[in-house]
Image (tube, rainbow, N blue to C red):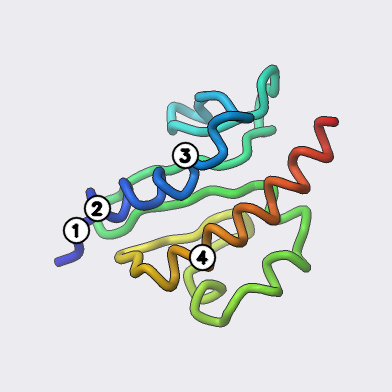
Amino acid sequence: MADLEAVEARLWQALDRHRPELVDGAIYGVPALVWPGATGHDYFAAVKRASRHVGLYLIIADRYPDDVAAASPTLQACRTGRATWSFRSLEDDLAAELEALLDRLLERYRAEHA
């Protein structure tokens, strides 16, 4: 069985690198990171643990499909919806690639709020 607590912690570790610019928020009660002053669905990322996976919600990814298309097939295979990724595990290589995607998407998100 997957250690979903470890997966969730690893996702937050990847997102924590962006906390100097982002603040804690929530979307439908799900913990999220948002641009200061952002409201509604204008969040950067949200994380929610389910019974068999941990969901990462990146609404920004839907607006920048080229950034997602640059990801490996392995990371793209974790995408389960327009803005949703599901992880049962998160090995170092995949986590590093996810961090690179988050970096690219944060640049876009920052530019939207400049």
Q: Which mark is residue 80?
A: 4
Looking at the image, do the residues carrying marks 2 and 1 touch, with CB atoms under 8 Å apart?
yes
For this rendering, which residue is in front, 85 or 10? 10
Residue furthest left as drawn: 1
The amino acid pointed to by label 4 is Thr
Q: Quadrant of residue 89?
A: bottom left
- Closer to the chain start, of discs 4 and 1, is 1
The reply to whether dot 2 and dot 3 touch (C-beta < 8 Å) is: no
The mark closer to the camera, 2 or 3, is 3
Q: Secondary structure at mark 3?
A: helix
Q: Residue at 35% of width from left, 65% of height from top?
A: 90
The x, y position of residue 24, in whole percent, is 50, 24
Question: Which class describes the residues within 10 Å of circle 1: few (<14), some (14-19), or many (20+)?
Answer: few
Name which residue type carries label 3: Asp
Numbered disc in front, either 4 or 2 = 2
Residue at which label 3 appears: 16
Image side of residue 99 versus residue 52, left or right: right
Q: Nearer the viewer, mark 3 or mark 1?
A: 3
The amino acid pointed to by label 1 is Asp
Q: Earlier in the sequence, mark 4 or mark 2?
A: 2
Coordinates of residue 61 in the picture (x, y in percent)? 68, 55
Between discs 3 and 4, the one toward the N terminus? 3
Which label is found at residue 3? 1
Q: Name the residue carrying label 2.
A: 6
State the residue in front, 36 or 85: 36
